[in-house]
Amino acid sequence: MSLLSLERVSKRFNGIVAVDDISFTVDRGQVVGFLGPNGAGKSTTMRMITQYFEPDGGQIRLDDVPLSEAGREAKKRIGFLPESNPLYGEMLVSEYLDFIAQLRGLNGRERTSSIAEAVSATGLEPVFHRPIGELSKGFRQRIGLAAAILHRPDLLILDEPTEGLDPNQRVEIRRLIADLGRERTVMLSTHVLSEVQSMCSRLLIINRGKIVADGAVDALVSRASAGVRVSVEAAGANVEERLAALPGVSGVEQHDTAASGRTRLSLTAAGADDIRPAIFELAKTAGWTLFELHQETGSLEDLFRELTATEEVAA
């Protein structure tokens, strides 16, 4: 049984469809990347899972129990870091986390131990007694994460957790999320595609309110139609023409002619077959000197552009 399931879930705002009849499940222990262009429905979907919004249609279940029935019990099992990460700048970090723990119904030793665990997990010890307003955005994101995991949730929802951070801060937060993902199920949205490949085991892509891709990151990237490219550098006669005529080659891009009469090309493969053996055999038959023969798989950026190459809409 999946931890989280969405069944034909829809949401509209003033007659505009933000989420359109989507269905997917999330199993325990997964770190799921949730991608889509601006206005695609990511934040709306996350807010329905966390019960900030109610779906207009369909059903969301946690451990097969509808959220509409589970109510507060479901909220106790979900942690949420919204994109805005609202904090009280005048509070000390210690005061803020104690306040959130009270709101979560944590008392006595349980509150003390939960705060200590969250602070340790997010590396907040150096700033625990400092005002939030004096801290960098990197530390403020850590505070938001600490607040989201205080109650030891089974499911952690993170909306753009690295937005606005500098490269060093992004690395720190990515490492932290990866550590959290070892003990919890995590669903996160981001515009930084490299973060998905470094942190996530699974990918969901939403566009215009509909799920357009769902699967393991590597498997989805390999599906990109622009996905297989082969770099070739060779010296010989009619290199470009003969490579372009090879079965399985759908496109040829010529680069600047290399030194000593070499030809440098990028070939696009039409299907999933590896065309490098055919190139090697052709080079031997034609008497070419082969300096480079290298295959590159498609990128997540290729896949994202293919699946979301439509006009963005507001949501």
Image (spheres, rainbow, N blue to C red):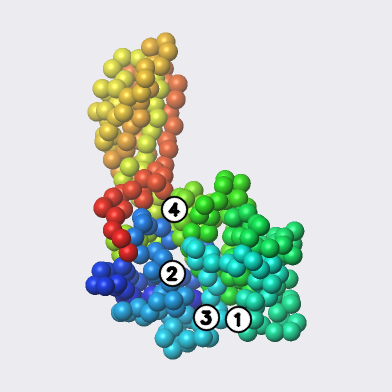
Q: Residue tagged by mark 1?
A: 103
Disc 2/disc 3 C-alpha distance (Å)? 13 Å
- Say few, some or many: other residues with alpha carbon within 10 Å of mark 2 (under 14 / 14 to 19 / 20 or more): many
Residue 176, image quadrant? bottom right
Q: Earlier in the sequence, mark 1 or mark 4?
A: 1
Tell me the distance, in whole angstroms, between the alpha carbons under discs 1 and 2. 21 Å
Mark sitting earlier along the chain (4/2): 2
Q: Secondary structure at mark 1?
A: helix
The answer for how far apart the CA atoms under marks 4 and 3 are is 26 Å
Q: If you read the primary sequence from the N terminus, does the residue marked by circle 1 or circle 3 appear first?
A: 3
Per the rendering, the mark at residue 46 is: 2
Going by the numbered disc 1, the residue's amino acid type is Leu
Q: Earlier in the sequence, mark 2 or mark 3?
A: 2
Observer-side mark, 1 or 4, equals 1
Q: Amino acid at mark 4?
A: His
Q: Amino acid at mark 3?
A: Lys
* Disc 1 and disc 2 in contact, CB within 8 angstroms: no
